[in-house]
Amino acid sequence: MQDGKNVVAIVQARMGSTRLPGKVAKNLVGKPMLARLIERLKEAEQVDQIVIATSNKEADDQVVEIAESEEVSYYRGSEKDVLSRYLEAANKFKADIVVRITGDCPLIDPITIDKAALEFLSSKAEYLRINVNDIGYPRGLDAEIFSLKTLLKVEESVIKEEENKDNHYREHVTFYINKYPDEFKFRAYQPPEELRRNYRLCVDEEADFNLIEEIYKRLYREDRIIDILDVIDLLDNNPDLAQINYQVEQKKY
């Protein structure tokens, strides 16, 4: 707990992915992909608690089982209204600061999470985003950090705009913030040069998973998590690997 602030990583995960159903439970060298994400996130020293936020659908019982097997907390809420799911989870676990992570990032980097969290806590920002565009971190190392107050501010603003019937505001937790950045104290967290790469390390489609699986097969050891610098080195020296998922396009809102 930093400066008395309870920092809670809330990981949204469900079985019903449209492009790769059940991806969070896919076997990644002996464990579900979501479990691999959790074991990496446990190494983040600035994170006080990990909560898996999933839906009330029966299919997502499997997500709860993964959370329980990894001994982390979980919250079940609306499948489509992810904004309310986050708010309810943040309130239940008394989060002052939320680190938002999606369940399709099995190479999330705890060191980057720690550094970004410390920058957020030392700044006056209401929202911090780890930058993963062409000159940022590899996609899949991204996270967003904001206070509970910011989340409540988003909810209030979205309620006022409900007449627009823009379900993107509720389906995508921070869509409103990114659409109206001038309404928030907005900060982008940039990578050091050694991590400035345009690689895809998230899992949206089968090709993405194939790359992640190959990385894990080559680098994973039971006594430690994979160092993200080793991943960068592997891809830099084996450009054929990065080509496995080069055709996958990031889903737009």
Image (cartoon, rainbow, N blue to C red):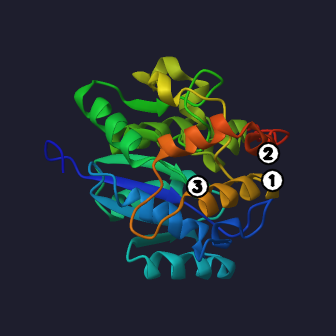
Residue at the extreme top of the image, as rendered: 182
**Alpha carbon of mark 3 to alpha carbon of mark 1: how far?**
26 Å
What residue appears at the point 30 percent right and 30 percent down from the top-left corner?
Answer: 119
- Confirm or deny contact between disc 2 and disc 1 (CB under 8 A): yes
Q: Which mark, by number, is residue 146?
A: none
Q: Is residue 184 visible?
A: no
Residue denoted by label 3 = 82
How many badges with numbers are in the image? Answer: 3
User: Which quarter of the figure is the C terminus placed in?
Assistant: top right
**3 or 1: mark nearer the eye:** 1
Inter-mark Cα distance, 2 to 1: 5 Å
Whichever of labels 3 and 1 marks the residue nearer the N terminus, that label is 3
- Looking at the picture, how far across and down is residue 181, in whole percent? 52, 22
Where 160 sits versus 59, above or below?
above
Q: Position of residue 174 (x, y in %)?
A: 55, 39
Compared with 173, 138 (above or below) is above
Name above or below for residue 190 compared with residue 70: above
Residue 37 drawn at (x, y percent): 51, 60
The answer to which quarter of the image holds residue 24 is bottom right
Is any atom of residue 16 visible in this view?
yes
Residue 4 in the figure: left or right of residue 67: left
Look at 27% across and 57% down and name the residue there. Answer: 48
Image location (x, y in percent) of residue 188: 46, 24
The local crowd at label 2, few if under 14, some if 14 to 19, many if 20 or more residues have their Cα within 10 Å, is many
Specify the farthest residue to the left.
3
* Residue under numbered circle 1: 207
Tell me the element at label 1: helix
* Amino acid beneath label 3: Val
The residue that disc 2 covers is 245
Three-letter amino acid code at disc 2? Asn
